């Protein structure tokens, strides 16, 4: 299990998908990440968030806890997407979350469902770097991001 680090839902636990198909961003990393994000954006109040390769949904749910108004979480693994939906319901934020159980590159080619002030992407370690760049470029070109959006990509050092 992991937990929401701060904000209105701080300390609440969330479930993670079974098995090793996802690797939730650790509490410590999320704490550091959001410290930088909030500093850069001047806070998350009323922000839109696009979380690609959402896994457990920890990053998108953390953003909502810290004041984001809406989050679109994209996760191709159906079991993981089901866990994200259950977590959003348990936390009382289901009305602010849209979980799309499809491949990120397909979603980014569609009409935007949120104007993201924060786009977070944590693709699987085995994901092709060129494919990830293409997906991110599609999100940017497709109108998913606000003009001064912050793009954060978590990748292994060898990628």
Image (cartoon, grey):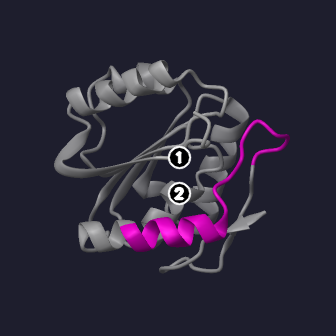
Q: What percent of the width, then of the height, locates residue 32?
A: 51, 71
Q: Which residue is mark 1?
A: 154
Neighbour tally class for label 2: few under 14, some 14-19, many 20 plus, Cα within 10 Å? many
Check if residue 22 falls in the magenta segment. Answer: yes
SS type, badge 2? helix
Of pointers 1 and 2, the one earlier in the residue sequence: 2
Instruction: State the quadrant of the N terminus.
Output: bottom right
Q: Which residue is mark 2?
A: 59
User: The magenta stretch spans which residues?
Assistant: 17-36
Residue farthest along the right direction in this orientation? 19
SS type, badge 1? loop
Check if residue 7 falls in the magenta segment. Answer: no
Neighbour tally class for label 1: few under 14, some 14-19, many 20 plus, Cα within 10 Å? few
**Residue at 45% over, 68% down:** 34
Above or below, comparing residue 7 to residue 127 in the picture: below
**Residue at 63% over, 43% down:** 55
- The residue nearer to you, when weighing 13 against 25, is 25
Q: Quadrant of residue 45?
A: bottom left
Above or below, comparing residue 75 to residue 67 in the picture: above
Q: Is residue 45 visible?
A: no
**Residue at 24% over, 45% down:** 115
> Distance between the Cα atoms at labels 1 and 2?
11 Å
> Quick check: 144 left or right of 80?
left
Q: What percent of the width, then of the height, locates residue 44?
A: 32, 69
Q: What percent of the width, then of the height, locates residue 19?
A: 85, 40
**Residue at 55% over, 65% down:** 30
Instruction: State the quadrant of the C terminus.
Output: top right
Q: What percent of the width, then of the height, locates residue 154?
A: 53, 46
Q: Is residue 148 visible?
A: yes
Above or below, comparing residue 70 to residue 2 in the picture: above
- The residue nearer to you, when weighing 148 against 106, is 148
């Amino acid at each position: 299990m992991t937990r929401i680090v701060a904000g209105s839902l701080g300390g609440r636990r969330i479930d993670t998908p079974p098995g090793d198909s996802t690797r939730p961003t650790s509490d410590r990393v999320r704490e550091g990440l959001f410290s930088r994000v909030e500093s850069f954006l001047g806070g998350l109040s009323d922000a839109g968030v696009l979380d690609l390769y959402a896994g457990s949904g920890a990053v998108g749910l953390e953003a909502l806890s810290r004041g984001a108004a809406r989050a679109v979480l994209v996760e191709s693994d159906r079991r993981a997407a089901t866990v994200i939906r259950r977590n959003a319901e348990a936390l009382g934020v289901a009305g602010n979350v849209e979980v799309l159980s499809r491949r990120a590159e397909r979603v980014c080619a569609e009409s935007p469902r949120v104007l993201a002030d924060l786009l977070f992407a944590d693709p699987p370690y085995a994901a092709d770097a060129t494919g990830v760049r293409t997906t991110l470029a599609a999100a940017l070109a497709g109108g998913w991001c606000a003009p001064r959006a912050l793009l954060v990509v978590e990748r292994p050092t060898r990628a």
